[in-house]
Image: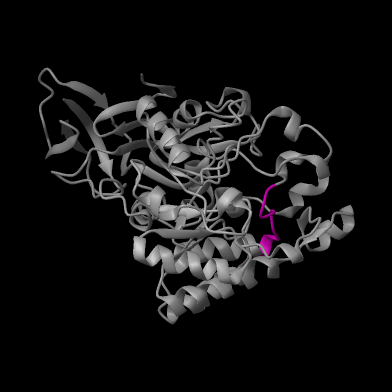
């Protein structure tokens, strides 16, 4: 039994006490402490625990960069209660054996609910469909499938995947990148790439696949999810598709909300990511689309890498950035402080909508009596300075090194169990 004392729910109204019993919220009001475990939440905002639809935990295969345990710790410290682990592991999560391994490891660690994402195609090669039905019916109960890191470029394969997904009641999440337009690409195709002598990654490579897949999803009556939207043009395509009734959802990463391709001037590979950092005009358009609801949610694309994969020349460096522990702060800086979102909006884009998209019945729920006690307590006035070496991930490839950010996660609760508190993981 835990009593959260004096929290402001969703940043609105007067402080209240929240009583947690048997994994649920049992009472809300002005409550007595008695002999209960008390969390002092004076000055803190209570939100539903965050849900990340796009996490790379690297297990199995690259446990030198991240594991289910270290990634789960980073997630709990970032305010997350559920994460979805991408399929580009080694071996690839394209069969029940691998997805069940990831699922079991998540249950053993028990810091967040770890939901494995299954591959759409065998080996992420885009040639033939993986065992979607077997993974969906496995103990892991896979609900999302993606070849993230690779685009399902063949339109016939993508159509078949969407058709199967409809029958299985699962979601196909696309890494939108027309590969014939990005051969050798190293940076956003624009002025910065041209000046630096880096091969360009055109916005049209993303936008054309999103448009194609929206048409395919509408044609077969299936759901589509677009990963890491990065261009203003993609937001326009999504706006058009949603207006015509297409069942499409989309995510944006924190780094695409905050950073732009000016960061590439130093050639520091910590800024290399796929899709690449875009122009400042794209960054502004993505913020507006998220506020509008055209882009549904924030997903971290947390991508840890070993030093040898990042501390090298730009062309050889692996794309990707850490994101789980910094996501909330970036959302506060880019969306809350400018007035684009209030704290209800933060709950919507970081908890409620991602849980709804993934079909999670016990996450993203209202803070109300009888609901699961998946909660995060945030100090909105506190600030912190990012130090990659001090983050919970095994890797330290954060683009925010040395930056001061607003907002500190003070505690995370998963079904009433405190998983992180005051910057430390609770075991």
Quadrant of the image occupied by residue 213: bottom right
Residue 267 in view, yes or no: no
Residue found 56% across the figure and 62% down from its top = 286
Q: Is residue 275 magenta?
A: yes
- Left or right: 279, with 10 as reference point: right
Q: Which residues are magenta?
A: 273-281
Q: How is the image coloured?
A: one colour
Q: How many marks?
A: 0
| Closer-to-camera residue (2/309) | 309
- Name the spot of residue 180 as percent of width and height, x first: 75, 65
**Up-down relation of residue 421 to residue 356 (above or below):** above
- Name the spot of residue 182 as percent of width and height, x first: 76, 61
- Pick the quarter of the image with the N terminus: top left
Residue found 72% across the figure and 46% down from its top = 272
View extreme (bottom): residue: 244
Q: Is residue 220 magenta?
A: no
- Pick the quarter of the image with the C terminus: top left
Residue found 42% across the figure and 65% down from its top = 164
- Left or right: 294, with 192 as reference point: left
Residue found 35% across the figure and 65% down from its top = 167
Q: Main secondary structure of the magenta part?
A: loop
- Name the spot of residue 175 as percent of width and height, x first: 59, 58
């Amino acid at each position: 039994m835990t009593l959260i004392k004096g929290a402001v729910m969703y940043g609105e109204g007067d402080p209240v006490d929240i009583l947690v019993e048997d994994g649920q919220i049992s009472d809300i009001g002005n409550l007595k402490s008695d002999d209960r475990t008390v969390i002092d939440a004076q000055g803190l905002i209570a939100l539903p625990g965050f849900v990340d639809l796009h996490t790379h935990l690297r297990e199995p295969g690259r446990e030198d960069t991240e594991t289910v345990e270290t990634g789960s710790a980073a997630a709990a410290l970032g305010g997350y209660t559920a994460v979805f682990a991408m399929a580009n592991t080694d071996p690839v999560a394209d069969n029940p054996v691998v997805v069940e391994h990831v699922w079991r490891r998540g249950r053993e660690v028990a810091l967040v609910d770890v939901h494995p994402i299954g591959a759409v195609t065998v080996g992420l090669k885009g040639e033939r469909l993986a065992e979607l039905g077997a993974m969906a019916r496995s103990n892991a109960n896979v609900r999302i499938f993606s070849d993230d890191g690779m685009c399902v470029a063949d339109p016939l394969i993508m159509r078949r995947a969407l058709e199967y997904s409809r029958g299985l009641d699962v979601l196909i999440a696309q890494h939108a990148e027309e590969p014939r337009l990005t051969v050798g690409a190293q940076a956003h195709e624009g002025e910065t790439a041209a000046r630096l002598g880096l091969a360009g990654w055109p916005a049209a490579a993303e936008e054309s696949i999103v448009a194609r897949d929206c048409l395919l999803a509408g044609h077969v009556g299936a759901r589509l999810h677009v990963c890491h939207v990065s261009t203003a043009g993609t937001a326009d395509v999504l706006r058009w598709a949603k207006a015509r009734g297409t069942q499409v959802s989309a995510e944006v990463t924190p780094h695409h909300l905050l950073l732009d391709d000016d960061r590439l001037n130093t050639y520091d590979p910590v800024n290399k990511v796929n899709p690449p950092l875009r122009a400042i005009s794209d960054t502004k358009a993505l913020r507006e689309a998220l506020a509008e609801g055209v882009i549904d949610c924030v997903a971290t694309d947390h991508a840890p890498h070993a030093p040898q994969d990042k501390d090298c020349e730009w062309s050889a460096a692996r794309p990707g950035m850490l994101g789980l522990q910094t996501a909330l702060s970036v959302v506060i800086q880019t969306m809350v402080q400018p007035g684009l979102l209030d704290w209800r909006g933060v709950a919507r884009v970081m908890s409620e909508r991602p849980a709804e998209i993934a079909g999670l019945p016990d996450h993203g729920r209202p803070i109300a009596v009888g609901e699961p006690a998946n909660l995060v307590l945030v100090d909105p006035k506190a600030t912190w300075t990012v130090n990659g070496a001090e983050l919970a991930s095994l890797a330290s490839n954060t683009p925010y090194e040395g930056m001061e950010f607003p907002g500190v996660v003070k505690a995370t609760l998963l079904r009433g169990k405190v998983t992180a508190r005051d910057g430390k993981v609770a075991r």
